[in-house]
Image (spheres, coloured by chain):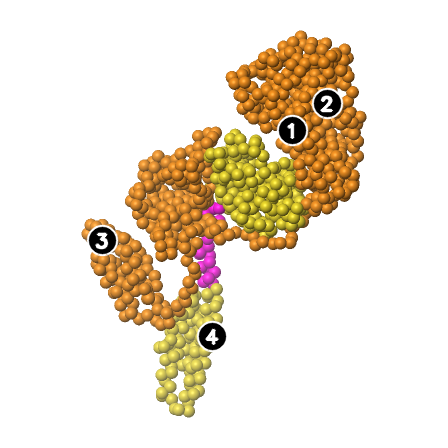
Amino acid sequence: MKFPVRMLREFVATELSAEGLGDLLTMAGFELEGIEPTADGTDAILDIKVVSNRGDGLSVLGLAREVLAKDANSRPTAHYERAAARFPGMVATGSEIGSVTIESAACTRYASVVIDQVVNGTAPAEIQARLEAAGMRSISLLVDLTNYVMLEVGQPLHAFDVAKLGTDIVVREARPGETLTTLDGVERELLPHHLVIANRERAVAVAGVMGGLDTEVDASTTRVLLESAHFVNTSVRKTRRQLGLSTEASYRFERSVDPNGVDAASRRFIELLREVQPDIVVHPMVDLYPVRPESPMIRIDLSRASQLLGMTITLPEALRYLQALGFHTTLAEPLFVSPPSWRPDVLRFEDVVEELGRVHGYERIPEALPFGHTVPGGLTLTHQLHARLIDTMLRQGFSQVVAHSLRDLHPLDAPGERVGPRQPGSPELAYLRNSLLPGLAEAASRNGARDLHLFEFGRVFAATDGEATREWAALAVLTTGNLHPSDRANDPVTPASFLTAKGVLERLLEGVGIRASYRRPAQVDPRFHPTRVAEVVVSDQGSAERVVGVVGQIHPLRAEALDLPAATILAELDVDALTLAPRADVELRRISRNPAVRRDIAVLMPKSVAFAEIEAALGAAEHDLLESHWLFDVYEGVGIEPGFHSLGIGLQFRKHGGNLTDAEANQARDAIVRALESMGGTLR
Amino acid sequence: MSDTASLVAQAESDIAAATSTAALRAIESQYLGKNGLITSLLRNMGKLAAEDRPAFGAAINAAKDQVTARIESATLVLREQELAAQFEAEALDVTMPPPSRHLGTPHILYLTTQKIQRVLGGLGFEYAESPELEEFRYNFDALNYPPDHPAMDDQDTFYINDDWVLRTQCTALQGRVFEHRRPPLRFFTVGRTFRNEAVDRTHNHTFHQVDCFMIDEGISMAHLKGTLGAFARAMFGDEVKVRFRPDFFPFVEPGVDYAISSPHLFDGRWVELGGAGLIHPNILERYGIDPNRYSGFAFGLGVERIPMMAYGVDDLRLFLENDLRFLNQFRGVLA
């Protein structure tokens, strides 16, 4: 809403400068968006942002009320008093003419006045200048005056040429197949729920939006029908949206226009026209206003209002603020107030509390911390687990990325049905991610795809069956290249591999007290190298096993398609499933003060025996003395029979409360060797 | 001169001539070792008369002590010299680049989230999350949106179907909480939100929000201002001031936007941070909470706004582009 400040000063006498008025309006809830000088440099133009529930602020009169309420030193002018009294005193000089029929509840009031002996020249220079300052183009005297009155009091007006229209008005819904060429020259197809203004034959205007081209006033116009009406905001919004046509009028109707000000705007128009052309003939107004809206009567408990605002508002203050804003009030407590017709947003006590607060000034509210009841705040266990997962990934040298949820299809999408917005606007936003891996792959490419160790924690989505959708928290990992940079030429490096990635997952889960096992998946996942992939499985207490994720080397064809290194390892965990997994309690063990004894063995094993089986055998053979074990060598090739490999296994034995003898250690080792031999192994 | 005295003199002269602690160790062994020259004198003990033996023994012990003391003091001096030489030889260029390591860097949005969690958790607010793919009714109906509010357009909101949307605001948590919790309550959330918007430096279709609300008896705009003040000062520094201006959101009444200013941010200009207000009585009533007894406040803001203001990030898109050259700059940020 742009306007020159002198228009505001016609309504309110104030000592505030243009900047001061801008600040006042900002603090009243009408934000100053810009201030600039007028073309002639004698005045300032304010550009004010009006929030969507304050249509009354889309007029100079409405903003003048705000100034009167908030600036205790301001006074209303005579012009303001006349506007407040609805511009009384119009004298009709002609005979009764024309008729109005309202056939839709979407039109709540329609006032038409026929004016004769008009000369549609140009508007006075001052009016033109003011409209220009408000960002409206000067067109002709009649059109400029309709716009000027709208700027002043917020009521959209429309002038029809009676020679083209006739004098009878019907407000109705459009007929099937009906079209109308609007003032902008575009032929519009109307839909049956579009509200139109029509004469006896045809639609001549889209109600509240734009007039028709073939009834517009022009230089030859001598008889005018002036429309001032009120339409239901939702009807205007729907029509405007479907026609893709937003105008100054529709903008106001969509927010709110004062239904009680309809006739006053017509009178103001005629008053202005008579100043230029005193000889016009004005016929009596035909004003249909079938149902007047009722204003609520609201009881105001000032002490409760003060308590909610956190600052005290006295009765005299409350009366002054509300009366300046046009509210009707009782004069003593119990205080009852009734909002004016231009404030449909005020419906209940709390709405009035806002009025009192913003006029009194939110800057006067002190700061206080809430006291009284306290509740334990902070994170739940689930969110602590999320934080620990992220933290453990960081500790393992992985960098966190955060990628988009809305995306296009990608070779690393998980198999399964997808979900996406029904109107995505662009193909890049067509789907909700069902895996974090595509985002990680893109992050890897963006950062050079070499020696990268990345993870993301975020939500993913899938369709479960047709309509239903599932959303869950996931954590995904991408690791490729050297685990640590090689610093100087020839420094040894360790590249990321399936096993290093598996280690990352093991430590990650250990960090939240979960033990998982890893096995070849039963179903082929085309994203992964088919013999270098494992399901991550956790066992619920004694019952079912649950697959919580996958870890594997990228399928070589996907790696090629994405231009990622072949040795890129990917993993993804369903964090929601993890939070359901049993978490190990701390089982505190005594620390032995006795020395450990180490024995290394090398066993020739058939490759068909999985290491997990060997580990199980180790545990069963000597669980008392065997403190830990580790695989330190895997060898196959020269000197080893095909189908076999040599495993170097370190064994560490320790006793509590006594030193282990060599003999005892050897005995324990031999028991383990026997167990391995029974599985087809040979001690080398 | 007795044998002992001449051996001591000889040892002292050797000690004086020694140029290394290793030479001193050799001298020690030569004179005082098991078969050392002085130790060996004890073998003569047997040849002496019984009454002479104590004096002889004492003399030899004194000689050993004297030589030992000399070696020790000479060792101190030579060790000092040797260390000085060693240090000189082992001198490093401390400005050489160290070996590098891949250091995991948290995303700045996560650091910001953690900081928010610390501050609001510390003020007694419970952290909760609600779905990103949200039911229409929690995103709009529960928040007092009229049935045809413009925000409900497909042009503004991503619909999956008529009943499910990508949440446009984290405020959608409110209805879910009010369904199963009674006042007094204090909650906050941090999460991802979506708006069907054209993307540019200051707009993205996907961004993140903090939403915080409480309900209790006697909660006022002053408590809102105080909580926001405490929050903003924890985020942006001790000198931050909070300003309210009237604004309109369907779920609050009175509704305000709040701005902050600090001499350290944007030359002290007021910068708008988000929306706030007292929870609309229609919402309280919808969930069976008596608005005459209880009141509550709510505020929200964009998570990205915090690093944008604190570090001068001028392009919203950077947060989801995952360029490590951008992200790694926030390594030192404390949460």
Asked whether B96 falls inside the magenta stretch, the response is yes
> What element does badge 4 sit on?
helix
Which amino acid type corresponds to the residue marked 1 in the rendered image? Ser
Numbered tag placed on residue B69 in the rendering: 4
Instruction: Determine the CA span between mark 2 and mark 3.
Output: 100 Å
Which portion, as a residue range, is magenta?
A: B81-106
Tell me which residue sits at (66%, 34%) in the image.
A345
> Which is more foreground, mark 2 or mark 3?
2
Instruction: Determine the CA span between mark 1 and mark 3.
Output: 84 Å
User: What x and y, as percent, mark residue A375?
Assistant: 58, 54
Circles 1, 3 touching at the beta carbon (< 8 Å): no
Can residue A353 be seen? yes
User: What x and y, as percent, mark residue B306?
Assistant: 57, 42
User: What x and y, as percent, mark residue B256?
Assistant: 64, 39
Residue farthest to the top, as pictured: A220
Q: Which residue is under mark 3?
A: A606
Sequence-wise, the earlier of marks 2 and 1 is 1
Q: Do the residues at pointers 4 and 2 share their chain?
A: no
Instruction: Determine the CA span between mark 2 and mark 1.
Output: 16 Å
Which amino acid type corresponds to the residue marked 3 in the rendered image? Pro
Sequence-wise, the earlier of marks 2 and 3 is 2
Our reading of the magenta stretch's main secondary structure is loop
Image mark 2: chain: A
Which amino acid type corresponds to the residue marked 2 in the rendered image? Ala
Q: State the orange chain.
A: A
Image mark 1: chain: A
Q: In this view, does B260 lie above or below A657?
A: above
User: What x and y, as percent, mark residue A312?
Assistant: 74, 45
> Which is more foreground, mark 3 or mark 4?
3
Q: Which residue is under mark 1?
A: A256
Q: Which residue is under mark 2?
A: A264
